[in-house]
Image (cartoon, rainbow, N blue to C red):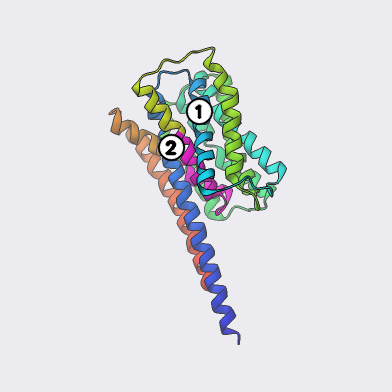
Amino acid sequence: MSVAPSVEQNKDEHSKSEHKFSGQLAVLVTAVLWSTSGIAIKVNIWHPMVIAGFRSLLAAVFLIIVRLITRTRVNKQNDRFPFWAGSLAFASCMICFVVANKLTTSANVIMLQYSAPVWAALLGWALVHEKPRWEHWGALVLVSSGLFLFLKDDLSAGSLAGDAISLLSGVFLGSFSVFLRMLKKGNPQDAMLMGHSIVALICTSFFFLFPPSFDATVVLSISFLGVFQAGLASVTFSYGIKRISAIQAMLIAAAEPILNPIWVLLFIGEKPSLTALAGGIIIIVAVVSSSLISKYREDREALQ
């Protein structure tokens, strides 16, 4: 009599494990899409705020089309606090990232923004009681050291205001993932759609201050940024964040600054230094190891 329930329970635990693995894969795809922003923005001659506005505008349109095709409606079970907090955090992160890039070096911006896993760990522990495991804390240390090595050659004094806004962008990025995680009964994509709408509303107004010119390169780059780099990435991230913890999502997403120089190498020919390569290897090992250790533990618990 006791065997059947045990088998069913094991099947259920194994299903949960696969559920989380698909979430990890979705966030990894998101990191790849996010990492393409550098190349697409470099070939676009528009003002950064105009780029941010039209990227979010196209992303919002893309998300609306996806919802119409899939017949997905706004989830009325969205909790007001995490929904609006997540939307505002997402919008603030994107705007801060653009502004910081105008005030300090891009290396400083990426370095400081990817303090996000630390804020995700602390906020996730405080708000949703997701106490980080030892592999998460270990990965945080390795990610931090890897990012330092990876960007050490490019770090400069920078602007105090720009560095402060970069760090604030990291706080918003980490808190954003936690607030989405709090939407247990809601749809994270609702918050991301609202975030893109907020950015579009604010930043497209810069169109009148910095009228953009149009050519094939500009149209292709902004279309790619809006549809794939922001729109599709919002779909994959909202799928993944519902299946894994906020800290793990941020650790996997930290692969983004590693992939950026790869695209630069392939399309522009710039080669990273040996120090940067060493830092990149450390981060990749940290992220992959953390994910594999978590999955191994979950598989063992499913079989017990």
Q: How crowded is mark 1: few (under 14 residues within 10 Å), some or many (20 or more)?
A: many
Q: In this view, does 188 lie to the left or right of 216?
A: right
Q: Position of residue 117 (x, y in %)?
A: 55, 42
Q: Mark 1 points at which residue?
A: 109
**What amino acid type should be assigned to the residue bearing mark 1?**
Val
Q: Which residue is drawn at 56% across and 33% down?
A: 196
- Residue furthest bottom as drawn: 1
Q: Is residue 255 visible?
A: no
Q: Does the magenta stretch include residue 251?
A: yes
Name the image quarter holding the N terminus.
bottom right
Q: How crowded is mark 2: few (under 14 residues within 10 Å), some or many (20 or more)?
A: many
Q: Name the residue under label 2.
A: 228
Q: Which of marks 1 and 2 is nearer the N terminus?
A: 1
**What amino acid type should be assigned to the residue bearing mark 2?**
Phe
Magenta stretch?
Answer: 227-256
Q: Where is residue 280 in the image (x, y as percent from the top left)?
A: 39, 40
